[in-house]
């Protein structure tokens, strides 16, 4: 196995690790896994630089803007150097989505798992998501949905799968909040997840398109009001 192949394999392992934790949480309500070695080789660092550059492009120009040549130009390396590590343009798309998944899990999902089950965990998931969506990388789960809303392609299917998996995480957290008695017994998990997601779509519109500096505060206030209508009378913040 070449250095590039070895680096790609280690990188894929890290992505698989974070996805496995999320899938465990969705199915069992727990994200605990044994410790895994995250040693980084030089070839993996090169691949990471390529993917990082591509991800920054996607944040401002969309997934369809990606090309091996433009990534190579921004990094100051040859197009063949990019190709030798990621392969085709489609493979670069896949690598970018994988990296977004990994970073999203690290920034949003994993920190929230340290919070108690129920509303504290759900609140942490949403607040982490809000903070991340307002930064330079935005949220491909939301922005990508508009880019591919009327396009039938493998990329649309891949994005849809990721979005549905994330919504399943939110739904699991809502169900746990119900089990803990933090939410009213008549709470519909699907409805609450829909309303949370709708807030995030509004956030992306106002923060990214309108560039409203108060969008972050507005969505936090809206979320607080939303959950207050679902909270159990027996739950005290």
Image: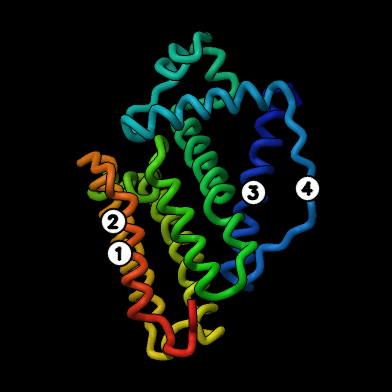
Q: Earlier in the sequence, mark 3 or mark 4?
A: 3
Secondary structure type for disc 2: helix
Q: Earlier in the sequence, mark 4 or mark 1?
A: 4
Q: Earlier in the sequence, mark 3 or mark 1?
A: 3
Q: Position of residue 16 (x, y in %)?
A: 64, 48
Q: Which residue is mark 4?
A: 36
Vertical side of 128 occupied by 80: above or below: above
- Callout 2–callout 3 Cβ contact below 8 Å: no
Q: Nearer the viewer, mark 3 or mark 4?
A: 4
Q: How is the image coloured?
A: rainbow
What residue is shown at x 49% (from left), y 12% (from top)? 79
Q: Nearer the viewer, mark 4 or mark 2?
A: 2
- Callout 3–callout 4 Cβ contact below 8 Å: no
- On residue 218, the disc is 2
Q: How many marks?
A: 4
Quarter residue 70 falls in: top left
Q: Within 10 Å of the Cα at label 4, are there few (<14), some (14-19), or many (20+) other Cα atoms?
A: few
């Amino acid at each position: 196995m070449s250095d590039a192949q070895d680096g790609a394999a280690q990188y894929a392992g890290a992505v698989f690790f974070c996805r496995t934790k999320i899938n465990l949480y969705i199915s069992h309500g727990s994200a605990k896994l044994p410790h895994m070695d995250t040693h980084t080789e030089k070839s993996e660092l090169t691949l990471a630089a390529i993917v990082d550059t591509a991800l920054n492009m996607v944040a401002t120009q969309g997934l369809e803007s990606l090309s091996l040549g433009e990534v190579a130009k921004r990094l100051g390396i040859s197009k063949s150097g990019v190709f030798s590590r990621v392969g085709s343009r489609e493979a670069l798309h896949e690598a970018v989505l994988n990296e977004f998944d990994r970073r999203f899990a690290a920034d949003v999902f994993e920190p929230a798992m340290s919070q108690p089950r129920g509303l504290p965990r759900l609140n942490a998931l949403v607040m982490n998501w809000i903070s991340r969506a307002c930064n330079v990388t935005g949220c491909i789960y939301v922005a990508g949905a508009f880019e591919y809303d009327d396009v039938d392609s493998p990329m649309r299917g891949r994005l849809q799968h990721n979005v549905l998996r994330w919504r399943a995480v939110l739904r699991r957290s809502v169900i746990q909040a119900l089990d803990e008695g933090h939410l009213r017994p008549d709470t519909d998990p699907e409805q609450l997840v829909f309303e949370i997601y709708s807030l995030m779509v509004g956030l992306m519109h106002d923060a990214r398109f309108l560039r409203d500096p108060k969008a972050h505060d507005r969505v936090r206030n809206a979320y607080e009001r939303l959950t207050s209508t679902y909270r159990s009378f027996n739950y005290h913040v």
